[in-house]
Image (spheres, grey):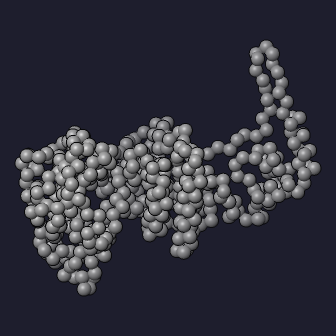
Amino acid sequence: MYWAAGITIAAAVLLAGRPCAADGDDQLLAQDVSAGSCPGACQALSSLLQDKVSFRNSSIYNLEEQSYFSAQQSTVLPFCRITPTVAKDVSITVITTHKFKCPFAVKSGGHAPFAGASNIQGGIIIDLSSLKGIQVSSDKKTTQVGAGNRWVDVYGKLDQMGLSVVGGRVSGIGVGGLTIWGGVSFFSGRYGFACDNVRNYQAPLLMNGFLGYVQNAPTNIDASLINIAAYNQPAGIFYILEAMENAKPEPEPDIFQAFRPIETLSSTMRITNLSDLVHELEGVGALGLRQSVWTFTTRASGPLLNTILSTWQTEIGPLKDSLASFIRPQYFQSRSFEGIFYAVTMEWANPNEDGRVLGAAKRIVDKSVVEANRLGLSEKYLYMNYAWIQQDVFSEYGKDNMDRLVKVYDPAGVFTVLQPGYFKLPNQQQIMLADSAWQSAIIVSLIASRVIVPNYSSQTSTTVPLASSTGK
């Protein structure tokens, strides 16, 4: 059987910028940093992005240096300039600057007046001037605008259609800087700042893709989606990974169409078989580290998913030097259940960090459940294979069901006493503790039945197993 499947790293970096931040926040200083590792970063980017990288004394470099509003900005000289044409180029650049520890600045319109605001001496400048797409939605209620546009470009396009947006009041102001830091508009008396009117930035398209899949999942029972937000400790980055599978060998199933506009860092989408696919998914986690997985369940909601991701990022923030972490919302439907169950995964090496890591994981779950309850979107179901030992995976079974499980499948409590690991029915534990004499008789009987019979000719032993272990 062949599947259309693969893993797409849909965003290399989740930008943690704050819309409507205070003016002057996080200003870059115009100090020379070229003595560090910026030359190596620029050379690496030149290999990756080729003609999108320009160096000092080149015609492109000199032209872009003269595009700033103020003389103070134009006299600041970066080691190299990056001119991305797609979002993926920005992701690659930010990852590279992190790996080489090279400071960088970002320029949209370059209208900020002070040196170092959107330029950097000896570092890397990411010049967004080539990101100039402008696309009006079919219902003419929203406009997708590239961060490299100046407002005159946006108005020129919309004027032809009898439309406008809440944007800048001067033609040469850049879309990116004005919108991120506030944005006073001709329409602000009615609609507020420009940043108050942003429907979404590119990263939330991933959420829209996931929710679009959830909405359409009942129409395609062959499709499966594993959606993973991850923090990679060695690289120091957040990223999104989407594993999309379809049981029919269709290269681009319609159910995943919401993901297609998103720029990707890499993709392995292909027609393949399950043997190949499971090996690829095996490589998502790391072997040999300390591990913890926690779970909770909700119904689908964009605002709730956004809050959960934000909570996850906040809680792992103080631990970023110690661990890798993943949060995986998994949509599932059956005849008896429909919802999203989450897996919150922590991977770390130092046993001394156990308390901090497990505490953070529990807070992620607790805060997410509180928010889901507040919105009326919480579900009691806990998927056992994603649960941590402290979680009550039987809470939604009900007393009658639990009593029936004990009576039918293990009335003597054998698998509580002699197989103490994994999850146990709480009332089963109580039954066994209340009848210690019967418990002792069971233990003696089973020990007697587990006799090792020597086979001297082959130097091996035969045993009688008590039970098979539980697997995931």
**How far across and how far down the image is residue 317, in percent?**
45, 57
Residue drawn at x 86%, y 39% is: 446
Residue drawn at x 79%, y 38% is: 466
**How far across and how far down the image is residue 136, in percent?**
23, 68
Q: Horizontally, is 186 left or right of 385 in the view?
A: left
Q: Residue furthest top?
A: 457
Vertical placement of 19 versus 235: above or below?
A: below
Whether residue 86 is visible here, answered yes or no, is: no
**How far across and how far down the image is residue 390, in percent?**
66, 56
Q: Horizontally, is 415 left or right of 179 in the view?
A: right
Q: Quadrant of residue 172?
A: bottom left
Q: Residue 224 versus residue 284: which sits nearer the camera?
A: 284
**How far across and how far down the image is residue 301, in percent?**
47, 68
Q: Residue 392 versus residue 161: which sits nearer the camera?
A: 392
Q: Residue 436 versus residue 251: which sits nearer the camera?
A: 436
Residue drawn at x 82%, y 58% is: 430
Vertical placement of 267 versus 153: above or below?
A: above
Q: Horizontally, is 249 left or right of 433 in the view?
A: left
Q: Quadrant of residue 165?
A: bottom left
Question: The C terminus lies in which quarter of the figure?
Answer: top right
Residue drawn at x 88%, y 44% is: 442
Q: Horizontally, is 328 left or right of 182 in the view?
A: right
Q: Residue 303 versus residue 184: which sits nearer the camera?
A: 184
Q: Residue furthest bottom?
A: 189
